Amino acid sequence: MTTAWCYLYCSEQHIVVLVWREMTEESSTTSPLSFMTQITGGMTSSFSRGNEFYFQCGVLVIGVLGTAANALILYALVASKQHKKHLLIVHQNVLDLFTSFFMIITYSLLLCNLYLTGPAGYWLCALLLSESCIWWGTLGSVVNLAIITIERYLKVVHSSWSQNKLRNWMTYSAMAFAWIISFVTNVAVAFPTSAVIDGACHSYAIWPSNTFRVINFLWNFLAFYVIVIIIFVFCYWRILIVICRQARVMATHAAAGPSTTQAHAQAQYNQIQSNVIKTMIFLSAFYAISWLPSYVYYLYLNISPRPHFTEIGYYASVSIAYLYMCTNPFVYATKFDPVKEVLLRLIHCKKISE
């Protein structure tokens, strides 16, 4: 409590009285939006609280849809026997399912407007109400998406090396790395920077200085957006070059004479590889587009000495980012042929039973 007052007094002297009053009189759970409204000098009106309520309900709906859709896609991956062939893709859906499930839990608790007390209240604030579990799964999903991209790159561009060197233990280690790096980056930061004051949760609010807060944001922005985008662009650019070259070679062989069994098998394998790569390129591009508004908005809030906070900007950017987790399964349903076939069979069986 003293640390929060000292930090706010030193960095925002012109609003210290307003912030102190808000922190001591507020008796309900405060979301990141409410606290950001306080530190930028704005009073939270009844209109703002109404907007926040509708936003929380919207995210809750996104979480329910995302959980159901990701669970269905996981079933389809197992039913089509793709879960052993594409471990990282299955892991991607597990991470998305984890994120969607904790959207339901977190925003259900936020809508309950809990009064927090004691150690249990602090843990509830730092672990759930701060949305740290949501971001744990989200950042893990981003890391796993980059790992899938690198794996595709190695299998297509350096196929001989990958056949001789890649092992299952490397895949499992990469999956564990996605969970660990996202946990350390997000959940481990949430605990020391969150506090329960007069029954209200103030998450990511207690920083030793403004410099630490900016450094944390820049690390997240560079590591989980800029570097990941660079990986996407470089790897898929090289992959597409190799695929085009292979397609020209296959076309030459087909024109030279009748197709053989080996050529047919190679063509089928190339088609499967192409479908997987198309799916991952679409997901990567969708990630880059959907998360850009959120990162730009938070970059403005962290870099600007006196940012002008607007609810519309917050709601719009975060809603688009959360929709990414919900719509991922539909990409698999429309782009990944084995999953599509299982889902079509389910629909066909339902029509027959009716």
Image (cartoon, rainbow, N blue to C red):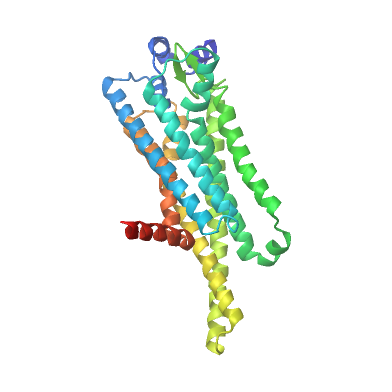
Give coordinates of residue 229: x percent, y percent: 52, 50
At a point 36% along the width and 31% down the height, the residue shown is 56
In the rendered image of this protein, does residue 256 appear above or below residue 211? below
Residue extending farthest bottom: 257
Give coordinates of residue 320: x percent, y percent: 38, 42
Give coordinates of residue 301: x percent, y percent: 43, 31
At a point 59% along the width and 53% down the height, the residue shown is 87
At a point 53% along the width and 45% down the height, the residue shown is 94
Q: Nearer the viewer, residue 31 or 1?
A: 31
At a point 51% along the width and 56% down the height, the residue shown is 79
Q: Is residue 292 visible?
A: no
Give coordinates of residue 64: x percent, y percent: 39, 39
Residue extending farthest front: 353
In the rendered image of this protein, does residue 154 appear above or below residue 260? above
In the rendered image of this protein, does residue 148 appear above or below residue 15? below
Q: Nearer the viewer, residue 3 or 340?
A: 340
How many numbered markers are drawn?
Answer: 0
Q: Quadrant of the C terminus?
A: bottom left
Left or right side of 250 for 302? left
